[in-house]
Image (cartoon, rainbow, N blue to C red):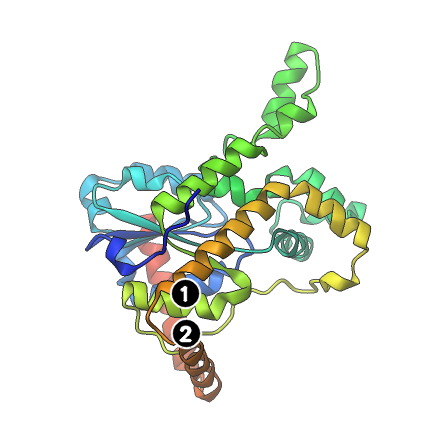
Amino acid sequence: MEVPGVTSNNISPGAAILFLHIHKTAGTTLHRIIEGEYNPFRIYTIFGGAIEWSINHFKQLPERRLAALQVVKGHMSFGLHEYLPQPSTYITFLRDPVERCISAYSYSKANPANPFYHRINRERLDLLAFLDLARWNQNLQCKTVAGIDRTEFRPVKLLRRSLRAGAPPSEQELDRWSNASVLEKAKENLVRHFSFVGVSDRFPEGLVLLKHLFGWRFSSYSSYRKSRGRPKTESLDPEILAAVEKRNEFDRALYDFGKRMFADTIERQDIDVEREVAAIRENAIGKQKSIFDFGGIAARAAASHLASLL
């Protein structure tokens, strides 16, 4: 499959941006940046704690409201652009799949609001047990970019249906969303519908590209919501890491594909990315964060979230 360069020429004027936020890929930081760049009342945010409700609410918005949106963002799968009457484009960041799984496990283990928190800590589940319990996290990036709705990925539903039929669900049935055809669909979507594909380990460079692609004005940024107590990858048993890699073979292929797209984008842009990254970092170090600054960020985020409820 050919990987085209991404330039601002293939972004339609007035196109809405759909930020497909894949869990544990530095997305919270990008949320805050977007909320500083756009009118909060022209942003629709999918709520992390009520994803299904938010998506259903979005789908039922009147066309006039949808047409006014400049940004749709959050934990969603590919496909919501079909509900927008205006042109649209997607952006996302991909992450090394092993690193992403480690962060997802650490976040779930440390966050009492997470549905797996109590079981992880009560039963002292390790990373592999968590991935087998939370199967949606295996090859998550492929599923999300391919457009598989998480409401369809319900092993519990499969289990109940199979029990009624007198047999437990097979591994093949449980894992039918993790295969080569899903990977190819995800690649196709990246090429056809995404004007930007970044990689988390080169996040600042990705932000520079986003500034140029969409005319954003920010000059610095702060990192948000890092997983507490996240173990260093090199401290984990190599056999565990190999097993995590095996469970995410299609995400590995998609990540490598995304890295090539990202490198191609940088190569085609007539900008000094390293110089601009250095400037962003210097501004971040020199900028004094006041209570007012944090209040402004929080206020814009709150206004954006409130508008999404209306």
Instruction: Residue 162: give its label.
Output: none
Give the residue type at disc 2: Val
Q: Could you say which is closer to the camera, residue 262 or residue 32?
A: 262
Quarter the N terminus occupies:
top left
Instruction: Residue 266: give its label.
Output: 1
| Residue positioned most to the front | 2
Give the residue type at disc 1: Ile
Is residue 77 among the parts visible in the rendering?
A: no
Instruction: Residue 273: give its label.
Output: 2
x 37%, y 37%: residue: 56
Answer few, some or many: residues within 10 Å of disc 1's Cα (few below 14, many 20 plus, some between 14 and 19).
Answer: some
Q: Answer left or right for 269 relative to 203.
A: left
Q: Secondary structure at mark 2?
A: helix
- Residue 140 image offset from top left, x and y in percent: 56, 43
Is residue 154 among the parts visible in the rendering?
A: yes
x 48%, y 61%: residue: 28
Answer few, some or many: residues within 10 Å of disc 2's Cα (few below 14, many 20 plus, some between 14 and 19).
Answer: some
Q: Is residue 123 above or below residue 288?
A: above
Q: For residue 170, which quarter of the picture?
A: top right
Q: Is residue 83 above or below residue 68?
A: above
Q: Could you say which is closer to the camera, residue 112 or residue 124?
A: 124
Q: Label 2, label 1: how many angstroms apart (C-alpha)? A: 8 Å
Do residues under tags 2 and 1 come within 8 Å of each other at their CB atoms? yes
Q: Secondary structure at mark 1?
A: helix
- Residue 7 image offset from top left, x and y in percent: 30, 59
- Residue 19 image offset from top left, x and y in percent: 39, 53
- Residue 55 image offset from top left, x and y in percent: 39, 40
